[in-house]
Amino acid sequence: MPPEKSAYALARYSRSPDSITQSLEWVRGHDSAKFLDSFYFQYGHASIADLGHTIFCFEGISELAAIEIEDEQLWDGQAKSSRYQDFSKGNIVTPPELLDTGGEAVYRAAAEKLLDTYLDIHRRLAEHLTEKHPRPEKMKAGAYKRTIAARAFDVSRYLLWLGISTNIGQVTSIRTLEKQMQRLGASDYGEVRDLAAEMHEACATPPGCPWYPEQDQEPLAPTLAKYAEPDLRSKASREKVAAWAQQNLNLEGDAELPEVDLIRPTDPLDETAATLLYAVTPHPFRIILDEVSGWSRARRREVLDVALEDRRRRDELLREFCSGYSYVFDIVCDIGAYRDLHRHRRCQQIRQKFTGRLGYDRPALVDEAGVGHLYDEALADAATARRKLAEQSAEATHYLLPFAARMRSLYKMDFAEAEYIARVRSGVKGHISYRTVAWKMRECIMEREPELGALVHATQPEVEDALTR
């Protein structure tokens, strides 16, 4: 059934004595669009839209757009894996901000250099790993070859960048889809705004469905297509908080803090104000929280008031207002590792803007395999190109950030989720970068709460098995 009709049928089923078969027959003869227009969009019965689900596939989008698409807590999907697939078979996505400008050639030249080096390093790493880890007799040749290739991709993927193309398939409720379209429509990135417009068009037309005759297909979600406008109020709220921070937040240079820092806020007002400021500044959460906790309650409340200035009665609070979690991790890691950690949904995540100011990760294997000079040269050329592109568009420079670039993000969770991430992501099958983050999360818990930390059965990064996938 079309998702809007299934939502209508299940909503009626919950509000009548009829069987589901009778409710389905009822829906056949009644207008679901009129029902949703009244009860969902006008009366605010948003839970009705949880009852209809859609499948969307995004092909040939940038990795940057993929991160934006996936940034929904109630999201289910899969993205193309940079650990197991050769991304050189994809396309270079040029940000719309650079099309038909002098910056387009600069961007593409730097992107092609990254891609060439990615392939060259992958080939050399595969040769090095084959020599270092000969195939065991019990391991089939095909499985061995695939495993060696995957381990080589674990390193060469550091040279992929946010403008390389990827694919995503997602399954979401209509309710989540609406929020996603509203958020994407207000993005800073032209590509992402264009995707939101395409999603609108897809909702208003029949889906690509080979299982039923074309003449029997109905529009996917026509009512949603009418109402999911860009969420400009949330965008304006964050911009106002950023302007407030520019005028009022005076922090000296960042202190030397661990790459995985566990913070335990005790005052919800402090935490919320600090999180709002964290999202729009480049500073560590601990530094902001220490500063905010010394302010008067009136000044802390001022930050919240600025963020709430454009909010209407039925609008949800910004994600930054989610507070009260026992485990708040401020994590600095490379973009590649962030992409993997970003998939964890049982926590609140706040990402700071992409930037090259935190430097790059450098896997030990590039020097071991004798390709460190190629690695450094490609990253340096990309940085030079970004400086040139900054004159035309700050957003466009983000597309040239390699996965090796380090970034900062905040994760709020309960103990069960902290245990899950530390246990699952530290396993020997994982990428060394996020394995290290997961182990440090476990160490932070052990330091603060040894009894609970002892329950976290994580694997040290030093424990390796190169031929296990």
Image (cartoon, helix red, strand yellow):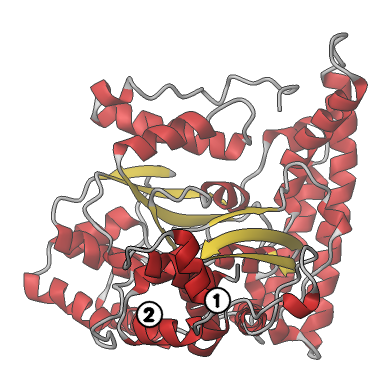
- Graded by Cα atoms within 10 Å as few (under 14), some (14 to 19) or many (20 or more), the crowding at tag 1 reads few
Residue for badge 1:
28
What residue do we see at 67% from left, 87% from top?
A: 392
Q: CA distance from mark 1 to mark 2?
A: 19 Å
Q: Quadrant of the N terminus?
A: bottom right
Q: Earlier in the sequence, mark 1 or mark 2?
A: 1
Q: Is residue 294 left or right of residue 73?
A: left
Q: Position of residue 15 (x, y in %)?
A: 31, 68
Q: Which mark is residue 40?
A: 2
Q: Position of residue 27 (x, y in %)?
A: 50, 75
- In the picture as drawn, the residue positioned furthest to the top comes out as 137
What residue do we see at 47% from left, 29% from top?
A: 423
Q: Is residue 341 above or below residue 319?
A: above
Mark 2, secondary structure of its residue: helix
Q: Quadrant of the C terminus?
A: top right
Locate residue 93: give its quadrant.
Answer: bottom right
- Graded by Cα atoms within 10 Å as few (under 14), some (14 to 19) or many (20 or more), the crowding at tag 2 reads some
